[in-house]
């Protein structure tokens, strides 16, 4: 017998044995998703959430997700700070 061989673990007969009983969570509402995005923005910008909420007034949830993805990509590519991309996208065009 090999002294380094692993001993067989408990037999897994179903997915419930493997993952336990997972309780499904209720889907999050758009308001909760928006709140989570605004909190993430305020943390990245190091500004109060009220400031961020005021800047994002009138934007849809899809627009906020787009701003987040573009700003993250901007920062990862080394083009500049996350806040620079965020504020640049919210600047009014003339």
Image (cartoon, rainbow, N blue to C red):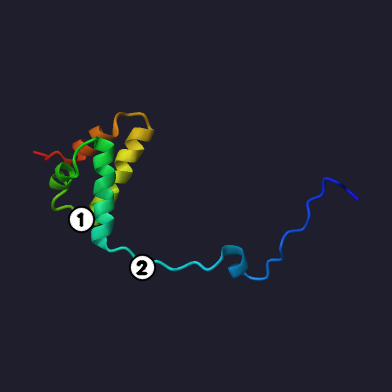
Q: Which residue is mark 2?
A: 26
Q: Quadrant of residue 88?
A: top left
Residue lying furthest left = 94
What is the distance, in whole Å, between disc 2 and disc 1 at their CAs? 22 Å
91 or 94: nearer the eye?
Answer: 91
51 or 81: nearer the eye?
Answer: 51
In this rendering, would 73 be left or right of 61? right
Q: Residue at x 16, y 47 (%)?
A: 53
> Of the residues under marks 2 and 1, which one precedes in the sequence?
2
Q: Residues within 10 Å of mark 2 (few under 14, many from 20)?
A: few
Q: Residue at x 28, y 38 (%)?
A: 44
Q: Give the number of the disc on residue 19.
A: none
Q: Quadrant of residue 55?
A: top left
Q: Position of residue 63 (x, y in %)?
A: 24, 51
Q: Residue at x 43, y 68 (%)?
A: 24
Residue 67, visible in the rendered structure = no
Residue 61, visible in the rendered structure = yes
Q: Is residue 92 above or below residue 81?
A: below
Q: Nearer the viewer, mark 2 or mark 1?
A: 2
In this rendering, would 85 be left or right of 26? left
Q: Which residue is mark 1?
A: 60
Q: Position of residue 78 (x, y in %)?
A: 36, 29
Q: In the rendered image, which quarter contains the C terminus?
A: top left
37 or 86: nearer the eye?
Answer: 37
- Mark 2–mark 1 CB contact (< 8 Å): no
Q: Quadrant of residue 41?
A: top left
Q: Secondary structure at mark 1?
A: loop
Q: Residues within 10 Å of mark 1 (few under 14, many from 20)?
A: few
Q: Residue at x 13, y 53 (%)?
A: 58
Q: Position of residue 36 (x, y in %)?
A: 28, 51
Q: How many marks?
A: 2
């Amino acid at each position: 017998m090999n002294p380094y061989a692993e001993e067989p673990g408990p037999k897994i007969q179903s997915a419930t044995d493997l993952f336990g009983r997972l309780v499904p969570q209720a889907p999050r509402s758009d308001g909760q998703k928006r709140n989570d995005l605004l909190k993430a923005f305020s943390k990245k910008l190091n500004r109060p959430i009220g400031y961020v909420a005021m800047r994002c007034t009138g934007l849809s949830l899809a627009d906020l997700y787009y701003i987040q993805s573009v700003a993250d990509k901007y920062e990862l590519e080394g083009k500049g700070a996350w806040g620079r991309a965020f504020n640049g996208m919210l600047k009014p065009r003339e």
